[in-house]
Image: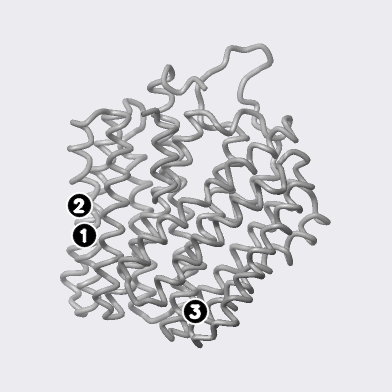
């Protein structure tokens, strides 16, 4: 199985404002005219696809957090997640404005946010056991897919409206599956549906990025669908999902919701297995067997820190932080040795930032500062591109014959 095919299968089953703003930047001078093609994941077209992918996957995650809060009666969670979802929507709108201009952004904004209102209608209908309200919301959402399909088809001049509508319909249906699972009170079912909904968003980002890059080739040079770009997108998706699932697990643990904690931890473990398979697909099964326990080691330290916070055990918290900071050196050394080019200290610093941004999320959860939880969560998820991007590029440069398209 090729890496790009592996990415599609895994992802389908499975600073944001800064990347949104990057959509409006001029194209990189990746290589001169007539120069031979070189394998790279770092073209402007690739930046576009990664930015859209990260914004859309974050949209799905925050929507799920908002509906979970609403259905469980956790009003503070619902309000904070909804505010973060609105901020994400503003970034999506700015991304469209960065490509098509302010007038297009003004038209797109209310249209994009419209479907979030319908999702709220469906959720409140479920909570009230109001079948008529649920059915009306589903009808509104399905009708909405045609509106968004028509808008994006008109903007790109190449995407068929029906094809876009079908992709948006799948987003609606996968998110509906998450909400239905939340209403059923079966956390394991919720997280299985959530990983599917999260992974599907890349199926919208890819054709949209491809259409835009072909529409404006001087601004978005390079392809959006090659093996190198596929690897970069896969790593971004898996690593941002890792942060989100970790935060869901720690939030449940600190809230005393043990069944939810176990389900989130199981989903996080499945995500870790996908990351391990990604490493093994590049470096072989032996490397995968070495990487798997090393990667999961830091999750154990995060659990230690969380339980230390819950017990107000300062010594346990400090030991966990020390273990996590020491771990950054181990992972840095592993990835440096594997890639032959990434400096161990640089990788360690990036992993340290992952640890510290996730710690900020957990600290906010323990303090009961729900708005800060979601502010820090967006920051922690956004940071993972700083790990995924250089790792993907190092792998591409290491194996250029495997990433030549």
Q: Outermost residue, right direction? A: 103
Q: Element under label 1? A: helix
Circles 2, 1 touching at the beta carbon (< 8 Å)? yes
Q: Name the residue under label 3.
A: 78
Residue 195 rendering spot, x and y as whole percentages: 40, 56
For label 2, count other residues whose C-alpha is less than 10 Å away and answer few (under 14), some (14-19) or many (20+): some
Q: Nearer the viewer, residue 159 or 37?
A: 159
Looking at marks 3 and 1 on the same chain, the residue that comes earlier in the sequence is marked by: 3
Residue at image location 44% in from the left, 64% down from the top:
377
User: How far is the residue under mark 3 from the one under mark 1?
Assistant: 29 Å
User: How far is the residue under mark 2 from the one under mark 1?
Assistant: 7 Å
For label 1, count other residues whose C-alpha is less than 10 Å away and answer few (under 14), some (14-19) or many (20+): many
User: How far is the residue under mark 3 from the one under mark 2?
Assistant: 32 Å
Residue 331 rendering spot, x and y as whole percentages: 26, 42
Residue at image location 43% in from the left, 23% down from the top:
397
311 up-or-down from 390: above or below: below
Residue 33 rendering spot, x and y as whole percentages: 69, 15
Q: Nearer the viewer, residue 141 or 84?
A: 141
Q: Name the residue under label 1.
A: 301
Looking at marks 3 and 2 on the same chain, the residue that comes earlier in the sequence is marked by: 3
Q: Mark 2 points at which residue?
A: 297
Left or right, 196 with respect to 260, comes to right
Circles 3, 2 touching at the beta carbon (< 8 Å)? no
């Amino acid at each position: 199985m090729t890496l790009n095919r592996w990415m599609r299968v895994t992802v389908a089953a499975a600073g944001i404002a800064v990347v949104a703003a990057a959509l409006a930047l001029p194209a990189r001078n990746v290589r001169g005219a007539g120069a031979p093609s070189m394998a790279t994941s770092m073209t402007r077209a690739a930046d576009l696809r990664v930015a859209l992918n990260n914004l859309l996957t974050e949209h799905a995650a925050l929507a799920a957090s908002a509906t979970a809060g609403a259905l469980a009666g956790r009003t503070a969670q619902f309000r904070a997640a909804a505010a973060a979802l609105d901020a994400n929507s503003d970034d999506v709108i700015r991304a469209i404005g960065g490509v098509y201009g302010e007038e297009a952004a003004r038209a797109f904004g209310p249209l994009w946010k419209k479907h979030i209102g319908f999702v709220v209608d469906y959720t409140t209908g479920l909570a009230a056991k109001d079948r008529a309200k649920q059915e009306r919301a589903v009808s509104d959402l399905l009708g909405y897919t045609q509106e968004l399909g028509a808008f994006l088809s008109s903007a790109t001049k190449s995407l068929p409206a029906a094809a876009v509508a079908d992709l948006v319909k799948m987003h609606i249906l996968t998110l509906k599956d998450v909400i239905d699972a939340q209403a059923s009170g079966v956390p394991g079912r919720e997280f299985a549906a959530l990983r599917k909904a999260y992974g599907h968003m890349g199926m919208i980002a890819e054709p949209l990025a491809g259409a835009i890059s072909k529409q404006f080739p001087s601004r978005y040079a390079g392809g959006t669908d090659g093996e190198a770009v596929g690897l970069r997108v896969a790593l971004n998706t898996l690593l941002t999902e890792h942060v989100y699932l970790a935060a869901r697990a720690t939030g449940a643990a600190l809230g005393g919701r043990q069944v939810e904690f176990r389900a989130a931890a199981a989903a996080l473990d499945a995500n870790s297995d996908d990351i391990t398979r990604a490493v093994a697909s590049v470096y072989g099964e032996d490397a995968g067997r070495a990487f798997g326990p090393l990667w999961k080691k830091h999750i154990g330290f995060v659990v230690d820190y969380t339980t230390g916070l819950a017990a107000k055990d300062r010594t346990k918290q400090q030991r966990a932080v020390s273990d996590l900071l020491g771990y950054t050196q181990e992972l840095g050394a592993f990835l440096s040795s594997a890639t032959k080019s990434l400096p161990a200290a640089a990788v360690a610093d990036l992993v340290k930032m992952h640890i510290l941004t996730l710690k900020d999320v957990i600290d906010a959860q323990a303090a009961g500062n729900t708005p800060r939880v979601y502010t820090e969560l967006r920051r922690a998820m956004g940071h993972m591109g700083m790990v995924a991007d250089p790792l993907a590029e190092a792998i591409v440069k290491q194996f250029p014959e495997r990433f030549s398209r």
